[in-house]
Amino acid sequence: MPSSVADTGDRMSTGVTHASRFVDELLHVLTLQDYNTNVVVVGVSALGLACGLIGSFLLLRKRALLGDAISHAMLPGIAGAFMVMSALGGSGKSLVGLLIGAAISGAAGLACILLIRHFSRIKEDAALGIILSVFFGLGVVLLTLIQQMRTASAAGLESFIYGKTASMLASDAIAILIAAVVISIACLVLFKEFTVLSFDQAYAQSQGFPVHGLDIVMTALVIAVMVIGLQAVGLILMIAMLVIPPAAARFWTDRLHRMLFCAGAIGLLSGLFGALISTLTPRMPAGAVIVLVAGAIFFVSMVFGTARGVVRRVVEHVGLARKVALQHLLRAMYELREAQADCEVTPTVLQEGRFSADALQPRRAWNGGELQQAIRLARRAGYLTPDSRGGVRLTESGANAAIHVVRNHRLWEIFLITHADIAPSHVDRDADMVEHVLDPAMIAELEAVLAKTDPALATLASPHHLPSAGGAG
Amino acid sequence: MSELLSMVQWQTLDTWIVVVGALCGMSCALLGTFLVLRRMSMMGDAISHAVLPGLAIAFLVAGSRGSLVMLVGAGVVGLLTAVFTQWIHRAGRVDEGASMGVVFTVLFAIGLILIVHVAEHGSDELGRAAGVDLDPRCVLQGALEMVHLYPVTLFGVSAPRAFWITAAVFIANVAIVALLYKELKISAFDPALATSLGISADWMHYLLMTLVAITTVVAFESVGSILVIAMLIVPAAAAHLLTDRLGSMLGLAMIIAVIAAVTGHWSAINVPSWVGFDGQSASTAGMIAVVSGLVFSLALLLAPRRGIVSQILNRLALSVRVAREDALGLLLRAEERGGTLTPTELRGAVRATGAGSGAVSWALHQLQRQQLVRHDSGRLQLTVAGKARATELLRSHRLWETYVEEHFHLPTDHVHGPAERLEHVTDPALRERLADTLANPTHDPHGRPIPPNDAT
Amino acid sequence: MMLHQNRPLVSDEASKPSAPEVVQRTADPVATGAEHPETAPLSMHDVTVAYHRKPVLWDVDFDAPEGHLIGIVGPNGAGKSTLLKAVLDLVPRVSGIVTIFGRPYRTQRQRVGYVPQRESVDWDFPVSALDVVTMGRYGRIGWFKPVGRADKEAAHAALDRVGMADYAKRQISQLSGGQQQRVFLARALAQEADLYLMDEPFAGVDAATEKAIIRILQELREKRRTVLVVHHDLQTVPEYFDHVVLLNMRVVAQGPTSEVFTPENLRKTYGGRLTLLEEAAHAIKRGGHG
C-alpha cells in the first residue's frame, strides 16, 4: 500500500479532470511515449513472462507456495545485508549487496524447509509456514533495529515488501529483462530434463538424470527471478505472478510445452495490461492491478478453458449422461422387441413395435423423470414418433440407431470378456463405436463370437451414421 | 530471571504486552493445531492476507473501525477464501496450494485497492482511521507495543482494548474447540469417515476457516499479518513433534505460545543491547516469531525418539552394535578355520562390511570391556561368553541363508547379503521359529554347519 | 444363475435373452439371496461412473444379499474401489441408482461402515488406537456431546475383538501394518453397522492378521450383517467368501462362490492368460465345494 500508492499518486497528482486531457494521456501511454511508463511496462511484462515459465514447473511439482515461503524468507537477508554494509561504512543500500543477502537467506530458508521435511513428521505445508513466518519475524526484528540506527537511513527497504512498481527504474527493468531471457533460455534448453523432473522425480533419478543438480538449477532460477522481481514489484505480486499464470494456463492445454508458452503469455499480458491500466487510472497501485488482471484471466480460463475448463467439463458430463440415457432407452426398446418377437430383430421388426412408458420403466433403473427425459431426447433426435395410443414408435433412423447401439454394446461386452486382461485400458465408451477404438482384425474376431448368438447384428455393415447424444455429445 | 529483568525496567505496559501476546498466541495455537494436522497450514497464510478486503469493506460499510464490524468482515472474507480455494481446487482441479495462491493474492490486491480508495476518498476521519489501522508498518509488525494507548473499562477493570478483544476471542475459541472437540478431531483425521458418519468434513473445514479468519484479524492488530502465521503454525508444529495425543498437543501448543510471548517480549527489550544497540528495543511481534522458531528448532533437535539428535544417536548405536556383532562373527569364523585375528586384521575385516572406523573402534572397545573378547599376546580371542554370543549370531546367519535360498530361490552366492542384514535384528524367539519352519537344518546352503541351539 | 445380466454374453447358456430384467431379478431369489431386492442391504442398478471421459464402471447391476460375506474380485483397474466409493457418494455417478436397505445412502449413513485403504489417512496423527476406534461411535453420539463411558467401553470391546486390547494406548504410527488394519476393522465394528464396505483389508497384512480378520468377518456374517470386501488374492476367495462379484468394469458374474467362481468366469474377468488362476479355481472346486 504504501509506497507504490504514493508514487503513483504523485505522478498522477495532476489529476484527470478533463476528458480531452484523459484522451491525450491515453494516447501518450498507449503509444509508449512516456519514458517511465515504458520502463514499467517492459519490466513487468518481462517479469510476467519469466515467472509464467518457471512457475509452470513449480505448479506441476505441487510447489506453488514454495515461492511464497522463499520470498518471505528473503527479508532477514535483505535487512542483514543492509546492517552489515552500514557497519562496514557503506551506504547500506547497494543493490547488489542487498540482492546477495536476499538470495542467501532465501536459500537458507529453502534448506531449512528440506531439513524439516526430511527429519521430522512435519508435513510440507507446515514446514513452509514455519520458515515463512519465522524468517519474516527475524527480518522484522532486524528492520526495527535498522530504523533505530543513526548511521544509516533505512528508507526504501520496505519497498521489498510492497514493491514500488510504478517508480521502477530503468536499471530494474533491464535486470528483469536479462533474468527473463536467461530463464527462457534455461527452460528451452533444459525443457526435457525439467519435464521429467516435474513429472516423476524417482523415474528421472533411475534414468540417470542428475536430479539434485537439476533441482538446484530450477530452484536457483526461482530464487533469482524473485530476488530481482522482489525489489521491483514487491512480495505479493511476485507470488501472484509465479502462481496465477501457470494455473490459468493449465486450463487451456494438456501439453507441457503449450502450457509453458501459454503461462508465459498470460504473465506477459497481465503485466502489460495491468501496468497500462494503473497508469491510466489515478490512485491505482500498479502491483495490485496486475494481480487483478491476472486473476481475471485465471477466472476466464477456469470457466472457459478448452482443456480443463469448468464449462467444458460440465458440458461433457451432461453430454455423457444424455448419451448414456439415450443408449439405455434404445437398448431397452431393442431388448423388449427381442423378447416379444420370435424372429431376428430387423429394423422393420423394431419399427412395428409400440412402446409405452409402463413397459419401458421396469427395464432399467430410471427414476422419476429420467425415462421421460430420455424419450424427449430421442424424439428430438428423430428416433421416435408418438403413437396414436399414447406410446411411441421407433422411426427408421431410430430403429437403425437402436441396432447399432445394441451391436456396439454387445461387441464391447464380448471384448471385455475375451480380452479382459487389456480391457480396462482400451474401453473408451466416449468414442461411440467399437470401430473407432479397436482395429478391424479385432472387430472381426468379436463379430465372429457375436454371430453365434446374434447373426443379424454380427453381419451388420459398419455403421456410418452413428447415434449421437441428441446433439449434446 | 529477576536480575536479568532489571536490566531494562519492566513496567505495567510490558505485562499488558505479554498478556495480550500470550492470549493471541494461545488462540492461534488452538486453531493452528488443527490447521497443521489437516495439512492446511498455508491456509493460515492465505487467510491472513485475504482478510484485507474484508476489513476495508467493513470500513466502508460501517464507517468506523468498530471491532465487531471488523470481525464480521474478516469472518466473511475468511470463509470466502476457504470456499473459493475449495471451489478452484475441486471444480478446476487445481493443486490446493496453487488455488490458495490464486485466491489470496487476488483478494489481497482487491484489499489494497479498496484501502487506497478509503484513504483517498473517505472522510478525513475515516481516512485517518484507515491510516491508523491499516498502516503498512502495522500490517507488517503489528502494534503490540502500543496496546496501552486504548484503555477500555469493563466490569470495573481498566485494561487495554486489545486485552478485552483477545480475551474474548480466546474464550470463544476454547469454548468452540471444547464443544466440537470430537468433530474437529475426526474430520481432521479421516474426513471421509467423518462425512459418512454425518459430520460433514466440509462444514467443519469452513467453520475452522472462519474462526481462523476472526482470530487472525484480532491478532493482526497486535502482531501483524505475517507474524500471525508464526503464532498459528509454529507452536502447533513444535507440539506435534513432542507428543502423540491430540489433547496434549493442544495444551503444549498453548504453553509454547505463552513461553514465546514472555520470552519474545523480554528478548525484544534486552537482546538489542547485547548486540550493540544500547537502549533500543526490537519488534516484540518479530521476536515472538523468532522465539517460537527457536522452540521449534529445539523440539526438532531434541524431541525424544523422533528428534534429530536421538535419530542420529540411534543410528550410531545401531551401527556400533552391527560392528560388534560382525566382529564376533568374524572371530568365530576364524576360530572355525583354526586361526585367530590380530586387532588390525579384525578392524580391517569389520571395516570391509561397511562400518565406519569410529564405530569399529568403539565396538572393539565395548567387546573387551564386556569381556566377550580377550587380548592374548597380540591376537584376539573369544571368551566363553563371547563364543556363546557369536555362535547364536552365526546360527541366525546361516538359518537366514537357508531360508532366503529356499523361499526366494536366490542363487547360493546371493544369500549372504540378506542374511547379514537379518541376523542383527533376530531375537532368540524368532531364530527358533525360523529353525522350526526350516525343520532344523544342520547345514547352510554353502554346506557349512549350522550351530545347534544352546538352550536345548 | 451365473450371469446376472440378461443381455447375451458369450457364454453358452445365455443363448437368447428372455424375460425382462426385473422379472429375472425377483424370480431368482436364491441366486441373489435377496428376498426383497427393494430392501436389500445394497442395491445398485445401471450404475455408470466415469472419471473425466473414461468409464470406470459400466452399467453395474448388483444386489447384495443380506447376511453374506461378499468378495469383490477383479483385475487392476477393474473399478473395485470405485464401486465402494460410488456407494458412498464419494465419486459422482453418470447414471444409475444406489440404495441401501431400499433408501438413498444419505439417509442410511449410520448403517454403513466403511473401511478405507490404509494409505488414506495420516498415521502420524496424534491419536491412540483406542481414539481411532472410538471415532466409529461419533455418529451415534451426536453433535457437541462428549464421548461417554458406554462408547469408550464399546470401543474397548471392539479393540478386544480384533485382538488389539493391549495396544489401546499406542499412538497409531507405532503399530505395524497389520495392527493398523485391525484398528480400522475395530473402528468399523464399533460403529455397529448393518452393511460393511471394506477396501482391501488384507493388503499388506501378515498371515496371522489375515486369519484374525476373516474370523471376525465370519462372526459378522453369523449376526446377519452384510460384508463387501474388495479382495485381491484369488486363491483365498472360495475359502473366505460365500458370495463373489467378479468385476471388470462391469459385473461379469455374481452369485454364490461355488457357482460363480469358475475358471470360465475367471477367464472372462481376467483374460485368457491366467492358467495359474484356473488351476487354483479347479483345486478349490475339488476341495472346498465338492
Image (tube, coloured by chain):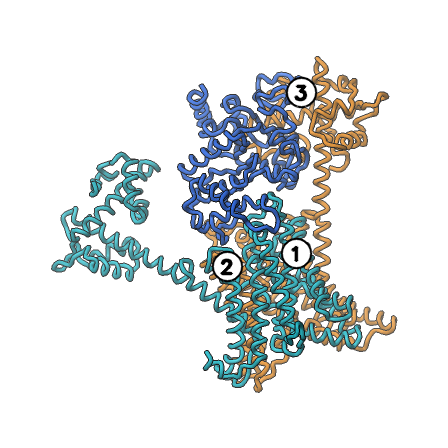
Is residue B411 in view?
A: no
CA gap, disc 1 and disc 2: 25 Å
In the rendering, what colour is chain A?
A: orange
Q: Which quarter of the figure has residue B282?
A: bottom right
Q: Which image quadrant: the N terminus of chain A?
A: bottom right
Could you say where residue C84 lies in the image, as x and y percent from the top left? Answer: 58, 37
Could you say where residue A102 lies in the image, as x and y percent from the top left? Answer: 55, 71
Q: Residues within 10 Å of mark 2 (few under 14, many from 20)?
A: many
In the rendering, what colour is chain C?
A: blue
CA gap, disc 1 and disc 3: 50 Å
Image point (71%, 17%), residue name: A345
Q: Residues within 10 Å of mark 3 (few under 14, many from 20)?
A: few
Is residue C150 in view?
A: yes
Is label 1 on the same chain as label 3?
no
Question: The disc labelled 2 sits on which kind of residue?
Answer: Met
Question: The disc labelled 1 sits on which kind of residue?
Answer: Ala
CA gap, disc 2 and disc 3: 59 Å
Looking at the image, is A187 positioned above or below residue A452? below
Q: Nearer the viewer, mark 1 or mark 2?
A: 2
Question: The disc labelled 3 sits on which kind of residue?
Answer: Val
The chain carrying label 3 is C
Is label 2 on the same chain as label 3?
no
Q: Which quarter of the figure has residue B214?
A: bottom right
Of all chains in the rendering, the one displayed in cyan is B
Q: Which residue is label 1 attached to?
A: B82
Dot 2: element? helix
Give residue C23's mark. 3
Q: Nearer the viewer, mark 2 or mark 3?
A: 2
Q: Which residue is label 2 attached to?
A: B249
Give residue A467's mark. none
